[in-house]
Amino acid sequence: MDTLARIRQLAAKEFSINPDGLDPSAPLDTLGIDSLSFIEFMFKVEEEFGVTVSDEDLKAIKTLSDLERHVAAALTAAGKV
Amino acid sequence: MAARRVAVTGAGVVSPLGTTVEEFQRSLAAGRSGIRRLAPELAERSGVQVGATVDWNPAPLFSDAEAANLDRASQFALAAAAQAVAASSLQMENLNRDRIGVCWGTGMGGAHTQETSYQQVYGAGEWRVRPLTVIMGMNNAAGSNVAVRHGLRGPFANYSTACSSSAMALGEAMRAIAAGRADAMIAGGSEALLTPGILVAWQALRTLAPADPADAAASCKPFDKRRAGLVLGEGAAAFMLEEESRARARGARIYGVLTGYGNSCDAVHMSRPDRDGQIRAMNEALREAGLSPQDVGYINAHGTATAVGDVVEAEAINAVFGPAAREVRVSSTKSLHGHLLGGSGALEFAAALLALEQGILPPTGFLDQPDPACALRHVARDAERVAPPRAVMSNSFAFGGSNVVLVAARA
């Protein structure tokens, strides 16, 4: 499963929504996600992929696609891809 | 029966701004911050860069043996309570102590003790801990120690409602006296939880401020556009509360009359604050005090310097105060002493009393760029001297949605 698909699966599980209904380009704050749930989700993404998403990184992450790009870049930098 | 009013006749403080009331108030008046970079052993593992710690030496107050049997939070509590008793000039042993009780507030209780025992079992794999672990670590240890130390056999209560704990303790102590269940109460709060294992949990919430790169002391900036979250602190504050006519009859110094207590719950979200809950608590406190918004000259805000929290509080204050919001002065002293969590309500009440008794309004430190979304009459950067106001308000708005507001009026 590719990175974006894995992220969508994680998000669907975390927020109890259908993964197929998750638009990767939709702004995250339109997905009806609560702020606490969002940082829990980031924690799970960090655990799942073995990467870090810092507060600074978060400023540039507005959509699931942004998150996928960040994770992919972090994995490449760590030589994990 | 005529209404029983409650006077504040003693105060004690152990804080990142000093370990006496006088030192604390001098620091506030000077706009001095007790926020510093945390020691490497705390910062490196937890990722938390700054905090407000107490420069603490138990030796003057406790023998080595006594100190070894008291969690840090209990030491702070006992020290603050002893100051409050001394300041009140009440001779406890001459009083009917069946009629004097304790109300205390704390978020985590004996956190250092708990951390030490977990380190022992899960860290070192040594499944043996000190027998006193429960007694030192339990949430009510601080308050119970105060009751034991002063022989207080009246009503006892310990409140743990996160950031509103000790404000609630003060309010409920007031209620106990007003209801005739006690003639005096020691009321206050304490917190000491700056341990690696607890700091890492706070860091995970992504709500703590990083170190200000130019000046670590300026890391907590409530109401400022540049605010970046809260800074944790530790310490304790305690007050002697007495039925007013008794206090006057014995010629006690009266710092102020604790005259309003609002207690509401948001019931909306476990961490995000709600304007409506805050409005209800402020209105309840004013109503009980028999005061109008224009009677309040100063508000010590909850003001934790989170992006959302400061805005919600500013909106709530404006909603309650209406046109008077253009006059009432507001500051968040968390900018200087940090967020004492369970101890914050009590410590910030001590800051509010400085304004009430002496007309010295403590500032919101480092407020150089007020956020227009926080439209308040800030006391910014430097303390201000004014004619002592008729009344002051102190806000505490907690995780879990508890809102406590205290109002104190001139003696």
Image (cartoon, coloured by chain):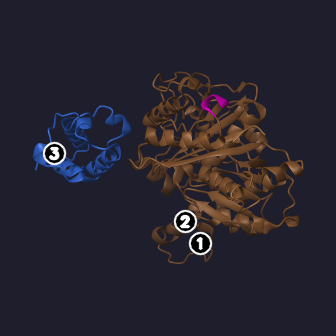
Chain colours: A blue, B brown
SS label for mark 3: helix
**Label 3: chain letter:** A
Q: Which residue appears at 29% of the width and 31% of the height?
A: A60
Q: Nearer the viewer, residue B82 or B31?
A: B82
- Distance (Cα) linking label 1 and label 2: 7 Å
Q: Amino acid at mark 2?
A: Gln
Of the numbered discs in the image, which one, if any, rests on residue B247? none
User: Predominant secondary structure in magenta?
Assistant: helix
Give the residue pinned by disc 1: B133
> Callout 2 environment at 10 Å: few (<14), some (14 to 19), or many (20+)?
some
Q: Residues within 10 Å of mark 3 (few under 14, many from 20)?
A: some
Query: From the image, which quarter does the C terminus of chain B lie in?
Result: top right
Q: Secondary structure at mark 2?
A: helix
Which quadrant is the N terminus of chain B positioned in? bottom right
Dots 1, 2 in contact, CB < 8 A: yes
Task: Give the residue pinned by disc 3.
Answer: A3
The residue tagged 2 is B114
Q: Which residues are magenta?
A: B292-296
Q: Earlier in the sequence, mark 1 or mark 2?
A: 2
